[in-house]
Image (cartoon, rainbow, N blue to C red):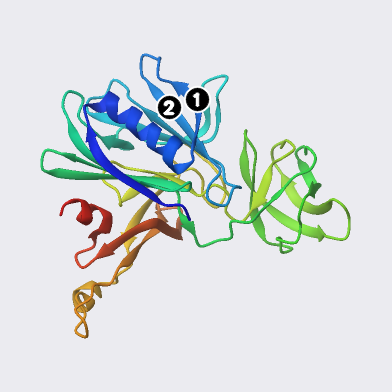
Amino acid sequence: MAYHSTSGTANNTADFLVKLKDFLTTVVGWTLHDDGSAEPDPYHVLKSVGESGIEDIYLQFINDTNTDRIVVRGSLFWDATAHAGVKEAYHNSYTYIRTVDASQFLNWFFADRDHVFVVTKVAATYYGHYSGLINRFWSGAVAVTQTAAGPGSDVVLQVNDASIFTVDRYYLIRDDAGIERVQITAVDTGVTPNTVTVANLANAYAVGAKIGEDPQPVIIGRYQSPGSFYALNKFDGWSSTTGQTGSSAAAHGNFHTASNPDKRYGLLTMFPWLVAHTSSTYKELRGELIEVYAIKDAEPLIQRMCST
């Protein structure tokens, strides 16, 4: 995995937006998908296919009229012609990077083509922000549809690889317009292209739609990550911009007090940050944050490194 980091000083919020865009596009390998730098609320939409080359990650960073912040939004797809996101995930009050509009501030960038973790220091306080993919607990494999499909029952879909499916299991299907949960009732790997039969399909899907256990597990973090987030989708798709809530927490089970530092060599244990959906109607442990760890008192390792 090509993992990159850098640190520096931004002159103000506007300068920070440019520095973040330049880091992700020229160093890490993201693409500037839509340049809105000339808009009244300047923005950049950055796209990545992930480290695997098969992901769909769209993040929008906006220097809007809110004070001292870069707003962050994710979307199922971003239409660069219409300059609009499809099935976005964000919260007007929480999903942003803390900045300073009128003076300099320190910043640290950590990223690969799957995610970005940003730390800023405003006065004496460090603020973290995590957005992008997570290390999913479900499979990242996807099959790609070879023909368009309409809604209906017992819909047969031509796909490039049906071997990744298990009959009677549920999967997510997505394209640039929609996403939903479907049940696979039949698999045929003996024909070319392979086919799968879907019990019910509520929406139409274009050629190139992807079907898999967990496509696009993208989360948009709050201004104090790790912590609460808004996911792009959940097990049954997208419901609203803030309809896929969740939270991350260090997987130490209170053993950090007993294990850090260990008695044998005085070493510290690094604990992963688990990612879970935690609403009253939907609870699921979905994965882990990428390259973010907790030590001893469960503070983010990256944030602790920056404070030293």
Q: Is residue 112 above or below residue 301?
A: above
Image-based side of 127 in relation to 61, left or right: left
Foreground residue, 52 or 288? 52
Q: Secondary structure at mark 1?
A: strand
Dot 2: few (<14), some (14–19), or many (≥20) neighbours within 10 Å? many
Percent position of residue 109, x then y: 32, 43
Foreground residue, 103 or 239? 103
> Mark on residue 114?
none
Q: Can you see residue 92?
A: no
Question: Residue at coordinates 79% horizontally, 54% vertically from top-left?
Answer: 196
Asked where in the image residue 184 lies, by quadrant, the reply is: bottom right
Image-based side of 93 in relation to 79, left or right: left
The three-letter code of the residue at mark 1 reads Asp
Percent position of residue 258, x then y: 20, 78
Residue that lies at the very extreme toward the front in this rendered image: 26
Dot 1: few (<14), some (14–19), or many (≥20) neighbours within 10 Å? some
Image-based side of 52 in relation to 94, left or right: right
Question: Residue at coordinates 79% horizontally, 43% vertically from top-left?
Answer: 146
The three-letter code of the residue at mark 2 reads His
Foreground residue, 272 or 121? 121
Question: Residue at coordinates 29% horizontally, 24% vertically from top-left?
Answer: 14
Foreground residue, 108 or 178? 108
Q: CA distance from mark 1 to mark 2?
A: 6 Å
Q: Earlier in the sequence, mark 1 or mark 2?
A: 1
Percent position of residue 150, x then y: 77, 37
The residue labelled by disc 2 is: 44
- Quarter of the picture holding the C terminus: bottom left
Residue that lies at the very extreme toward the bottom in this rendered image: 264
Q: Is residue 180 above or below residue 241?
A: below
The residue labelled by disc 1 is: 34
Q: Are marks 1 and 2 in contact (CB under 8 Å)?
A: yes
Q: Secondary structure at mark 2?
A: strand
